[in-house]
Image (cartoon, grey):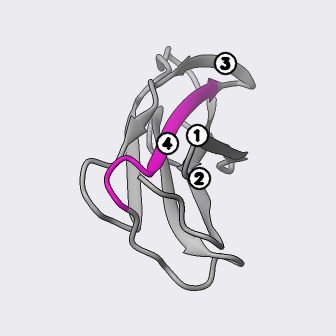
């Protein structure tokens, strides 16, 4: 595998439903303006779940298994006891640079109260 010059990873973190933590990564040319297809294994993403500001759990790293420009992972990472809680997701992503993975700064979703 070879990295692509000028390609970077952009990520998105969301709470899709009660405690449903989802993280997405996409490959773009510099500036996150033009999407760029990436070969199998180039895109890595994981999601971390937080409830009331405290870490709950994190997924393993997942990698795209076919050529794509967008890839995501999601699951319920926090329990939801009775009462109202505040949930958010942290997305971490990485991109193959030709010899190793470059990690990109995490992105947090807005908090959602359920």
Dominant SS in magenta: strand
Q: Which residue is mark 4?
A: 45
Mark 4 vs mark 1: give the one in front. Answer: 1
- Give yes or no for residue 90 being in the magenta stretch: no
Check if mark 1's residue and mark 2's residue have beta carbons within 8 Å: yes
Res. 103 in view: yes
Of tags 2 and 4, the one toward the viewer is: 2
Q: Residue at x 59, y 52 (%)?
A: 97
Q: Position of residue 78 (x, y in %)?
A: 50, 21
Which residue is denoted by mark 3 in the rendering? 55
Residue under the point 39% across and 55% down:
71
Q: Quadrant of residue 9?
A: bottom right
In space, the residues marked 2 and 4 are separated at their CA atoms by 15 Å
Which is more N-terminal, label 4 or label 2? 4
Going by the image, does 22 lie left or right of 101? left
The furthest residue to the bottom: 34
| Residue that carries the numbered disc 2 in the rendered image | 97
Packing grade of label 2 (10 A; few <14, some 14-19, many >=20) is some
Binning the other alpha carbons within 10 Å of mark 1 as few (below 14), some (14 to 19) or many (20 upward) gives few
Q: Earlier in the sequence, mark 4 or mark 1?
A: 4
- Residue 48 part of the magenta segment: yes
Q: In this figure, which residue is indicated by the disc labeled 1?
A: 100
- Region rendered in magenta: 39-50
Q: Nearer the viewer, residue 22 or 15?
A: 22
Q: Earlier in the sequence, mark 2 or mark 3?
A: 3
The Cα atoms of the two marked residues, 2 and 3, are separated by: 30 Å
Q: Position of residue 79 (x, y in %)?
A: 47, 16
Q: Residue at x 33, y 65 (%)?
A: 68
Q: Secondary structure at mark 3?
A: strand
Label 4: which secondary element: strand
């Amino acid at each position: 595998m070879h990295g692509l010059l000028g390609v970077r990873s952009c990520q998105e973190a969301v709470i899709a439903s009660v405690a449903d933590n989802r993280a997405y990564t996409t490959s773009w040319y510099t500036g996150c303006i033009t999407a760029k297809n990436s070969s199998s294994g180039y895109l890595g993403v994981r999601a971390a779940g937080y409830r009331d500001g405290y870490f709950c759990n994190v997924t393993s790293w997942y990698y795209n298994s076919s050529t794509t420009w967008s890839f995501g992972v999601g699951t319920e990472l926090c329990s939801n006891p009775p009462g109202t809680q505040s949930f958010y997701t942290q997305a971490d992503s990485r991109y193959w640079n030709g010899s190793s993975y470059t990690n990109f700064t995490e992105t947090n979703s807005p908090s959602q109260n359920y």
